[in-house]
Image: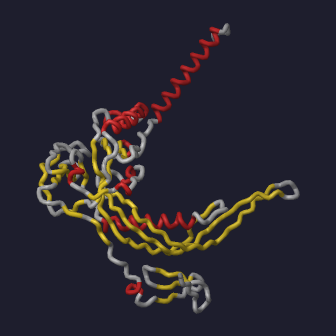
Amino acid sequence: MRLQYKCPKCSARMNFDASGAVLHCGSCRHEETVTDYQKQFNTPPVSRQQAVYDDEEARQYLCKKCGGIIVTDNHSAITSCPFCGGQAALGERIAGDLAPSGVIPFSVSAKTAEKQYKKWKRRLLLAPKELSKTQKSKKLIPIYIPYWLYHLECHGEARFHAVTTSTIMEETQDKAVETRHYELYRQGQICLPEYPICASGKIDERLTAQLPSYDFKEKQPFQIQHLSGCLSEKYHSSDQDLQPNAENAAKTEMDRFLMSALTGYDSVSVKERDYHVTVCSAEYILCPAWLAFCDTADPDYMFLLNAQNGKPASQPPISGIKAGAVIFLVAVFAFILFRILTVVLGGPLL
């Protein structure tokens, strides 16, 4: 049950400000401090599911050019960085370092991934010139992308502003637009048991955000054998570093959940909200992908394929000049073909 407090001065509803632990009245500006707030609502510690690498089990490489850190099994050797093509420093065996506790195995074969890559590269005919050059000599690389998998719970309340518009026909046959405004209130609770946040430092988050979702029901306990013939990027951000991102994501999902119950309005916007997010656990896992990096920092110029379901993250950008040239050539060809058919059927040449 959620308690609502009224202002002792004006009887208006008081809102709670968690940052200052005070009840605030929006009507008369009266404030009351909530004593022992931190003791009553102390956030429980996050349960972290992780493992460590055993002796003689794994090796990591450091790229001298871009600083990327790659982890692979102890029997594999890396000479160049999969991200920039630079020279990779001789790796050292790692033991006791943080290892993933879970992994989603590769389901898409190299042959299937190559077909998708060729289909993707066909679009390079209309891509900017610099992209066409950078991808000619690139090869697909099987790589595991690091993720933190959070278990999140969120509850709270929010106020919304909604608008409806309708057209009214006046007696004079003139039309008038009627706009109505509504103040709405909703409260609720959601649970996000497996919410992924990418921990990569080399793959742009704008690209991973477009990567089709993984099915975490197929997650398995991590074993070093999963890295045989594959590379794995070492996580760049810890779960504590990415926890604010996870909390913001939970609040966004809460907005969507509450707004899904607001139907029949032309537009709805969040006016104010008071959400409490609990991070119950965080698990370090690896997700499979096929990668073809390029020499530019633009994430649109990189090929990234979900190696569980075989779906690419994005399509190459299209050059406006090339697209315009193609449209012009098609129009010219269509005109010439039309004139030839006209002459064959006995019509004038021009």
> In terms of image quadrants, where is residue 199?
bottom left
Please say if 285 is above or below 48. Answer: above
Q: Residue at x 28, y 58 (%)?
A: 221
Q: Which quarter of the picture shows residue 124? A: top left
Q: Is residue 177 left or right of residue 38?
A: right
Residue most extreme to the bottom:
8
Residue 101 quadrant: bottom left
Residue 263 is situated, as x and y percent measured from the top left of the image, at 64, 63
Q: Is residue 67 visible?
A: no
Near-viewer residue (110 or 196): 110
The C terminus is located in which quarter? Answer: top right
Q: Position of residue 58 (x, y in %)?
A: 16, 54
Vertical arrangement, residue 281 with respect to residue 144, above or below: below
Judge whether 83 appears above or below 99 on screen. above
Q: Is residue 23 visible?
A: yes
Figure coloring = secondary structure
- Picture mark count: 0
- 6 sits left or right of 135 in the view: right
User: Which residue shows up at 15% across the image and 60% down it?
Assistant: 54
**Nearer the observer, 93 or 14:** 93
Question: Going by the image, does 167 lie left or right of 279?
Answer: right
The outermost residue toward the right is 171
Q: Residue at x 36, y 42 (%)?
A: 301
Task: Name the residue nearer the viewer: 129 or 117.
Answer: 117
Q: Position of residue 165 (x, y in %)?
A: 71, 60
> Where is residue 289 shown, x and y percent of the image?
32, 47
